[in-house]
Structure formats: structure tokens, C-alpha cells
Image: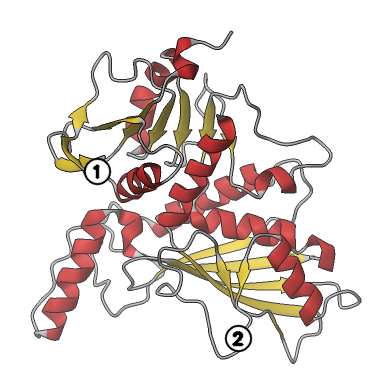
Amino acid sequence: MPSIERESQRIVIAGASSLVGAELKTLLEEGQFSGWDLRLLDEEAAAGTLTEAGGEPVVIQPVDEGSFERARFVFFTGSPQFVETNLAAALAAGAVAIDFTGKISTKDQPSSPWFPKLDEFWSTPIGPKVQPNGTHFWIPSAAAVAATSLSFGLRPVGLKRLSITFLRPVSEAGREGIEELESQTGRLLSLQSVGKPVFDTQVAFNLLERYGPASRQNLAAVGKALREEITACVSNQRAVLPALQVLHAPTFYGVMFSACAELDPGVADKESVSNACREAGFSVVRDEDCTPSNVSAAGENTIQLGLPQSDPTVHGTWWFWGAADNVRLPAWNAVRLAEKLL
């Protein structure tokens, strides 16, 4: 017989003040979980923030001894340290933990990656990854989903090598990152000196391979974490691991990427490559006059991809340009996972 906790209709968002936490709350209220008991928690610094849930004003609460009691799902959208502190309590309460922070697993609590196409990618030889009795999952970032989907999706057209450059928006640094880009943009247009407490460098109107030395944001560390995500997603599947580069882009939202793939010239043509990308879950833009962008991807639940272009000078080389909503896409995938586990 199912436990009381598994029959509960209580959901906890632990990290509710974050950008992903706010997006997740909206999606939960709009879909199948509308009407469920939604609890909003966060770290002490964010506790007390006034928001709304179910059309009613709600104050985000700090975590206490009974915060996860009778929870069916706990979505961790706060910092990695917040997850490490509270994961065991959520699992001990009988909840399914769904983590966004990139803490792929802990010593005592191994976890499984998931996004909608991953079950299909993993379908042979080991069977689908998600099991109905699973209790700890993590949601890959939009960048990791894009890279994994290209790696798996291009196998039918003879993928040999893959390299991807990701353009990181400031929203990956949270609300503080957004505020700093907004402030710097206004100050530079007014010919004033810029403040830079978050990035320790000018991020407005500027493409960068690294932030300032005093910044807590580190693009090399972001790249390392992204490689770990992708490696975990393609684990044991003999997929091609991509070479990666992560650059800063002076945009608020939306991760963009340029990918270069070496494909088998004997099977790869424009139609077969485009079809392979669609089968992998990308929304391929058919109009050659349109191109994916952080603006066009805003609010979308899939990754947009322009029509693949063959390199005119290097036979078998193909270029891809894509964009995804870095906040919306992971939140959407997490809700789909919760629905699958019901």
C-alpha cells in the first residue's frame, strides 16, 4: 500500500526566491498540480520575502524541523550548500527530491539525471532511467540538455566529433547578476563609472572569457560543472563527449550556443541532419530568414535550433546555432518529471 507521504498533495519549493524557484511555482500553479498545497522555503537571508501562491499573499519561510513533513515532492532550487544541508531531511520525510543545483549526487544519496528525451536516449541497452520508486533526481541545465541532445541526436548521421561554445547570460548568477548588468548598462550610457560587485568587471556591452579575479562567478568552474553534467547524462552510452567553451554574453536571459560537428559525409545531408535534430527534441527553425536568439527562446519549453549549415570548405563539417530559455526549460522539465512520477 502506498505510504501516506506518496499520497500527499504537498509540494515544497526549497529555494523559492530564486529565478528558477519563481518560474517553477508559476508552472506548478498553471498545470496538473494546480490546487496542491504549495510550501515556499528558502535560506535565512531570503526568508520573510513576500510573494504569492494560489492567488494569495505568502511569506517565504525558513527551513525548520517540520518543513518537509508529508511532502510528495521537494524541488531544490537554491544553492548547492542549501541542498547539502537539507536533502537528507527531505528524503527522510518520504519526499521525492528534485534538484536543480548541479549537485549530481551526494556520498549517501545517489541521484539520477532526467529530462524528457533522456529516457529515449537511454532506452537501449539498459532501459529507461526513471523508475517509479526513485526518490532523488536532478534536472540538467539548459546548456547540458542542448549538448547531450546533440551528442545523442547526431549519432544517426555519423557523429565523430563535437565542439560547442555556450554564451552564458547574467541570469545564471541570479537576480544580483541581472541587477548588475542593468545598472552597468544605464551607467555606461550616461558616461558614468560602473559598479561591479558581482562580476568584478564590465559585463555590459562586453563578451568575456573570464570575470574579474574578485568575482564569485567563475566561467572555468561553470565549464567544469557543465562537463560533469553532460558526462553523467551520456554515461555508459558510448556517446561523443563534446569539447566545451563557456563565454559571458551581455544578455539578461537565454543561453545561446554555436556547435561544430564532424559527421559522416556518406549519410549527412541537410535533410537528414535536420531530421536527426528534430528527433532529438530540438525545435528546428525552418525559415532560413529567421534565426534562434535569446529573445525568440524566451518562455519556450524547447531548445531552438537554426537550420544546420554544412561548412563549404571542410567536407563533413556542420555548424549549428541554437538558443534556450535557461530558466524556463529546466523548470518545465522538472514539472514533467513530477508528472511522470505520479
- Quadrant containing the C terminus is top right
Q: CA distance from mark 1 to mark 2?
A: 38 Å
Residue 262 shows in this picture = no
Query: Which residue type does callout 1 highlight?
Result: Ser
Q: Secondary structure at mark 2?
A: loop
Q: Is residue 119 above or below residue 322?
A: above
Q: Position of residue 175 (x, y in %)?
A: 24, 55
In the picture shown, does residue 180 fall above or below 12?
Answer: below
Q: From the top left corner, tell me how far across and down residue 158 is, in percent.
A: 84, 66
Q: 171 or 219, which lies in front?
A: 171
Q: Nearer the viewer, mark 1 or mark 2?
A: 2
Residue occupied by mark 2: 287
Q: Quadrant of residue 244?
A: bottom right
Q: Could you tell me which residue is drawn at 52 percent across and 52 percent down?
A: 226
Residue reaching furthest to the top: 1
Q: Nearer the viewer, residue 39 or 239?
A: 39
Q: Secondary structure at mark 1?
A: loop
Q: Position of residue 48 (x, y in %)?
A: 12, 35
